[in-house]
């Protein structure tokens, strides 16, 4: 989408009201005509062998900067999007564009955002949502009721949140007045941080609701200066987070994964990896909805086809293992290892387990409580199962804290780093976070905090 630069528009609120994630190019009105011409005349194609090499090196550089490996995305999409950014920056050859990015580093972020296509809408593909409402969700709710379990759904690649809120609305409508007695979690994740921030805000323009029955809008949204805000009873069901399907461990014990219009952008290798992740994530009998646009299918060893046209699958068969997660940047690990020699002894150890576990024995709890090292046990949803006094002190955790999300309780540790380290442990490998502490009296060094994470097995 191209919009007029709000700074030069007669009515700036019009272009400014669009989700930043839906806008590709912001330009002066007189520049829009030539831009359109360039865009319709095709995608950028690396013409010379050295241009192909240049592009590969550039994608490597982008990975080092952003942690995202776009070489695992389909090349034609990447080239089309690159062409858009080249047109927007008025650069003709890749070499010129690279010079431009070197001078304007903010362009890396724009290009990354442009590579991640975020088109979405509420109840996109009504046929699938009818099926979810009439067959799949009632089944999941019934099984959860019988088993006394929580309901755990995952919108993977949720973009600006419409899919996740649509799911939450369906569950709320199905459970009705009893919802207070249930634990429902709709995990909603995307690689694009800006999209997740927009989704979490939960405010959408009126045009988003064209295909929604007005009574549904009235029940679940409040009007706010011409826009609509998701009401708190729906928000409370959705947990948003930034998550890379290529690198991060999945959520365990999921009843339904919705991953639509995401895998179509991945190469076959990355598609396989994501599908393996879902096989690990889903409980036996759990559902995977890939959506009509998808051309790939999950492995027959882990899934059976329920509806080939809607691309609906059910988890069956062998236990799925996930391959170890690659570190975003091996250089970071080396730097951390080097620094560890100089760390003070303020160490917290977080141990995690993706499966429900027996509580530690009383004896074990007493022993852990006496340790000078902080120890926290969290489950696969990052919720605290046990925490000793040293960990409370070091991490600034007060109150009971049991059952609460560790990531959001701790003070002074970047949440994304902590989550990543725990995800490492969920994937079966140790992880770590090293943080420089602040708040020491003038002239003194507050030191470092090192958190290591380990998988915990019974
Ligand atoms: C077209 S949107 C799909 C939105 C929604 N699922 C739907 O079908 O309406 C694709 C989303 O996938 C996200 N995405 C791309 N690569 C990803 C990755 N490696 N991990 C997680 N999300 C990713 C993009 O950021 C984008 O928001």
Image (spheres, grey):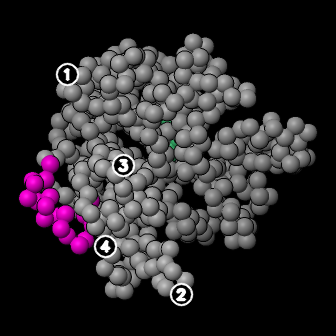
Along the line of sight, which residue is nearer the eye, 1 or 72? 1
Q: Is residue 181 left or right of residue 6?
A: left
* Label 3 within 8 A of ligand 1 by Cβ: no
Residue at 80% across / 35% down in the picture?
A: 14
> Which residue in the protein does label 1 denote?
146
Could you say which quadrant of the image residue 62 lies in? bottom right
Mark seen at residue 347: 4
Q: Which of the two residues, 256 or 170, is positioned nearer the viewer here?
A: 170
Where is residue 393 drawn, in percent x and y? Answer: 34, 66
User: Residue 205 at what x, y percent from top left?
Assistant: 68, 30
Is residue 354 shown above or below 162? Answer: below
Residue at the disc numbered 3: 405
Which mark lies nearer to you, 1 or 2?
2
Highlighted magenta segment, given as a residue range: 359-376
Q: Earlier in the sequence, mark 4 or mark 1?
A: 1
How far apart marks 4 and 2 lie (CA) works out to 23 Å
């Amino acid at each position: 989408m191209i919009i007029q630069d709000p700074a030069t528009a007669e009515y700036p609120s019009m272009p400014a009201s669009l989700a930043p994630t839906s806008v590709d190019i912001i330009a002066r009105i007189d520049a829009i005509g030539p831009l359109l011409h360039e865009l319709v005349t095709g995608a950028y194609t690396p013409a010379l062998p050295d241009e192909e090499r240049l592009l590969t090196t550039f994608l490597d550089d982008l990975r080092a900067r952003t942690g995202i490996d776009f070489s695992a995305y389909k090349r034609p999409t990447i080239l089309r999007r690159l062409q858009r950014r080249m047109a927007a920056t008025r650069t003709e050859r890749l070499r010129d564009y690279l010079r431009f990015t070197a001078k304007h580093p903010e362009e890396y972020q724009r290009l990354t955002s442009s590579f991640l296509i975020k088109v979405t809408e509420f109840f996109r593909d009504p046929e699938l949502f009818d099926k979810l409402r009439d067959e799949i969700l009632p089944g999941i709710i019934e099984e959860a009721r019988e088993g006394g379990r929580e309901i755990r759904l995952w919108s993977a690649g949720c973009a600006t949140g419409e899919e996740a809120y649509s799911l939450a609305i369906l569950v709320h409508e199905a459970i009705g007045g009893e919802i207070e007695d249930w634990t429902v979690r709709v995990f909603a994740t995307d690689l694009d941080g800006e999209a997740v921030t927009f989704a979490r805000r939960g405010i959408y323009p009126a045009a988003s609701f064209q295909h929604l029955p007005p009574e549904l809008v009235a029940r679940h949204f409040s009007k706010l200066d011409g826009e609509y805000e998701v009401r708190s009873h729906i928000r409370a069901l959705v947990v948003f987070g930034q998550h890379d399907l290529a690198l991060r461990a999945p959520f365990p014990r999921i009843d339904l994964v919705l991953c639509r219009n995401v895998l179509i952008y991945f190469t076959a290798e990355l598609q396989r990896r994501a599908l393996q992740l879902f096989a690990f994530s889903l409980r036996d009998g759990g559902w995977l909805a890939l959506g009509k646009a998808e051309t790939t299918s999950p492995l027959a060893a882990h899934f059976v086809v329920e509806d080939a046209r809607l691309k609906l699958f059910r988890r069956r068969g062998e236990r799925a293992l996930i391959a170890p997660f690659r570190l975003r940047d091996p250089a970071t690990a080396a730097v951390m290892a080097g620094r560890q020699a100089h760390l003070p002894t303020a160490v917290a150890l977080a141990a995690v387990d993706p499966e429900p576990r027996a509580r530690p024995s009383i004896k074990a709890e007493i022993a852990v409580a006496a340790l000078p090292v902080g120890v926290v046990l969290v489950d696969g949803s990052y919720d605290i199962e046990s925490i000793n006094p040293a960990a409370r002190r070091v991490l600034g955790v007060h109150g009971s804290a049991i059952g609460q999300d560790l990531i959001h309780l701790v003070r002074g540790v970047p949440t994304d780093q902590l989550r990543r380290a725990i995800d490492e442990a969920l994937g079966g490998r140790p992880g770590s976070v090293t943080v420089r502490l602040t708040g020491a009296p003038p002239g003194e060094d507050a030191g470092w905090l090192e958190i290591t994470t380990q998988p915990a097995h019974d």
